[in-house]
Amino acid sequence: MRIEFGRILCAADLSESSSMVVGYGSAIAKAFGAKLFGAYVVEIPVPAAPAASQALSTEQIMEIADAGRQELSTLLEGMAPETEPVVRHGPAAETLADLTVELKIDLAVTATRGFSGLRRLVLGSVTERLIRIIPCPLLIVNAKEAGAGPLPADAWHPNRILVGCDFSPDSNRALQTAFSLAQEFEADLHLVHVIEPFAYRDMLLPETASSNLKERIEPEMERRLREIIPEGADAWCDIQSSCLSGRPHEELLRYAREKKVDLMVLGVRGHSLMETLMLGSTTDRVIRQAKCPVLSVCPPASEKAGQ
């Protein structure tokens, strides 16, 4: 099934990385003939205590919004056949997620600066929050790794796409998106499953050595990887499937570096251990460290509402 990106939203905070975000959005918009929206959110600080600084006045919000709209218009100029700047105020992640619903967005693009450790805990991450609540696929580019300079509107064309496969419904959604993009860009597709010892603990006997885990499970995992490849897909796409062993984020990142992958596609949740930990231990870590863009594919909004 071909995935259509007819309406694309770029989350621009008007920092140096915004030109890169809009550049990626523009390249995809031109490939799909899509309308490109630029979104800027005026974040309103909420005082944590009476002594905290006061919130912005209505007049200040309007001034910032007007300036933001002008900058967005400049950023979007000539970037796609049809563009539109959008400015809102409120909590950044929640406001952007609401915008994707309001504007019927098919794909959102944002940047992360790759913070980790204490700095991440203190500063938080709009992107990591957005992944959990946005109802459409989200393309994340790493401003820290990729550089914050502008990207020519037609410069991005993924030739090698990696998709993480754990055979869960969320992974299957990511796989469908990856197949569609591989066909759209005539790219090679790499299907990767990571065998993580703890995740397969229920399949092992107590005396089974973890060093033997890969050779015991790998044949079955390779069979399942072959089974999820659509019939006839190899006629238009060069497909490689691999089983790795270790910590998922480390193995995916290593594989991406070695194979010079241009795009990683991941479901936002996973199977077994990853079902509860993937956002915190795999997707988040991949996003912070990946040198190529990462596309997170979310569950449908109806599923999120029922969680």
Image: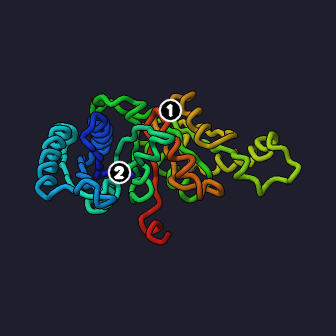
Image side of residue 20 versus residue 145, left or right: left
Residue type at the position of mark 1: Val
Q: Amino acid at mark 2?
A: Leu
Disc on res. 261: 1
* Residue 128 screen position, x and y as percent: 44, 50
Residue 99 visible in rendering = no
Instruction: Tell me which residue sits at (56%, 59%) in the image.
Output: 169
What residue sits right under mark 2 in the picture? 107
Disc 1 vs disc 2: Cβ atoms closer than 8 Å?
no
Label 2 neighbour load within 10 Å: few <14, some 14-19, many 20+: many
Q: Which residue does the image show at 26% across and 62% down from the upper left?
A: 102
> Which of the pair 252/192 is nearer the observer?
252
Residue 103: % across, % down: 26, 59
Residue drawn at x 30%, y 49% is 8
Q: Does residue 136 appear anywhere in the picture? A: yes
Estimate how packed mark 1 is, as few (under 14), some (14 to 19) or many (20 or more) residues with alpha carbons within 10 Å. Answer: many
Q: Position of residue 306 (x, y in %)?
A: 48, 72
Q: Is residue 263 above or below residue 200?
A: above
Q: Secondary structure at mark 1?
A: loop
